[in-house]
Image (cartoon, rainbow, N blue to C red):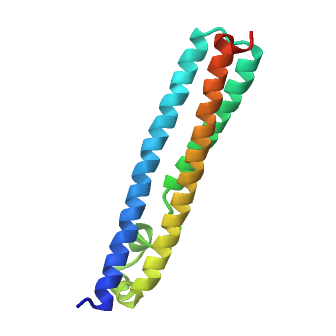
Amino acid sequence: MSTPNEHLTAAHAEVKAEITRTDTKTGLLLAFVGAVLAGTVTLAREIPLNLPAYTVGGAGVAVLVGAAGLLLRSTRPNLHGRHGFPLWATLTPEQITATVNGTDPATHIAGLSRLAVAKFTSLRRAIDLTMAGVALLVLAALLALGGAA
């Protein structure tokens, strides 16, 4: 039979794992966005572009840069010291022991869950922006290759 402490430990591990998964997905998407932007710059130099292609392509690049900004923001470390490493770095060994012994695990899980939701929300928005940006770049490529001639 499980004790409430085991349930809290399992919930804490689940939330930390979700944060890790979200950070991994964020890193992969950031690499993808960077590759798409680099490829776009390379192709834009090789293909003669007309005004509609420039306009739509520029919008696509702007949307992808916005997605990259969201991704970077979601992975930005929180150094305010409310919890985690920055807090521990400011405390003496005695204060760390007192803080750990006085912390309610459910409160810690709730704080981590809010962090996970914020990261997940930023990742979701960045995915939506990435899809929109790539769609605009595909449209710009079609316009450049004769769709608006």
> Residue 77 or 6: which is nearer the viewer?
6
- Residue at screen point 73% across, 12% down: 50
Q: Is residue 97 left or right of residue 103?
A: left
Q: Compared to 50, does 76 lie above or below?
A: below
Q: Compared to 116, does 33 lie above or below?
A: above
Q: Can residue 139 be seen in this view?
A: yes
The total number of labels drawn is 0
Q: Is residue 93 visible?
A: no
Q: Quadrant of residue 83?
A: bottom left
- Residue at screen point 46% across, 83% down: 107
**Quadrant of the image containing the N terminus:** bottom left
Q: Position of residue 97 (x, y in %)?
A: 33, 85
Q: Residue furthest right?
A: 51
Q: Where is residue 67 in the image (x, y as percent from the top left)?
A: 59, 43
Q: Residue furthest left?
A: 1
Q: Where is residue 15 in the image (x, y as percent from the top left)?
A: 40, 70
Q: Quadrant of residue 57?
A: top right
- Residue at screen point 48% across, 58% down: 77
> Residue 86 or 56: which is nearer the viewer?
56
**Quadrant of the image containing the C terminus:** top right
> Residue 72 or 106: which is nearer the viewer?
106
Q: Compared to 149, does 114 lie above or below?
A: below
Q: Compared to 110, does 34 lie above or below?
A: above
Q: Position of residue 8 (x, y in %)?
A: 35, 83
